Image (spheres, rainbow, N blue to C red):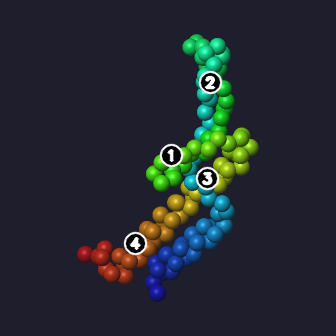
Amino acid sequence: MSQNTDQHEQRQAHIHAEIAALGPCLPGTISARRLRCGNPRCRCREQTSDQRHGPYHYWTRKISGKTVSKLLSAEQAERYRPWLQNNKRLHVLVRELEALAIGAAEHAEGWGEK
């Protein structure tokens, strides 16, 4: 076995361990929005001031190609933020595993050599 193969296998093992340790992974994003209400006499309707209501926290994601949002409390938003970060990290790690597998296949088949 070559040193390069050993390094790839060690990196794969490290990635698998990191994935196993991630914890909950939640897709999507959390955003805070300030909104205007429907009351025409409310302070939020004044053109000269930005007295909108909120912030309201929304978790937004795609389900079957459609954007879906869920209103969250401030506590829920804080609780789920690390889960969204875990999901982003998961995708980075999976892309790295894919790149390692592509490199291994190219090396094994001699596809990258000239």
Instruction: Determine which of the numbered discs, if any, sits on residue 67 in the image.
Output: 1
Give the alpha-carbon distance from disc 1 to disc 4, as whole Å: 32 Å
| Mark 4 Cα shell of 10 Å, populated few (<14), some (14-19), many (≥20) | few
Residue holding disc 4? 102
Residue 18 percent coordinates (x, y): 62, 67
Tell me how far mark 4 sits from mark 2, CA to CA: 53 Å
How far apart are labels 2 and 1 at the CA level?
23 Å
Give the image location of residue 23, x and y in percent: 67, 62
Q: CA distance from mark 3 to mark 2?
A: 29 Å
The residue drawn where x is 38% and y is 77% is 105
Q: Nearer the viewer, residue 84 or 36?
A: 36
The CA distance from mark 1 to mark 3 is 16 Å
Q: Nearer the viewer, mark 1 or mark 3?
A: 1
Residue 98 vs 32, above or below: the answer is: below
Q: What kind of element bears circle 2?
A: loop
* Residue on which disc 3 sits: 84
Residue located 61% across and 22% down the image: 38
Mark 1 Cα-neighbour bin, 10 Å: few <14, some 14–19, many ≥20 = few
Q: Nearer the viewer, mark 1 or mark 4?
A: 1
Considering every residue shown, the one lying at the far right of the view is 75
Q: Which mark is residue 38?
A: none
Task: Provide the secondary structure element on which disc 1 rests.
Answer: strand
Image point (43%, 68%), residue name: 99
Which is nearer the N-term, disc 4 or disc 2?
2
Which comes before the other along the chain, label 3 or label 2?
Answer: 2
**Quadrant of the rendered structure where residue 34 is?**
top right
Which residue type does callout 2 highlight? Cys
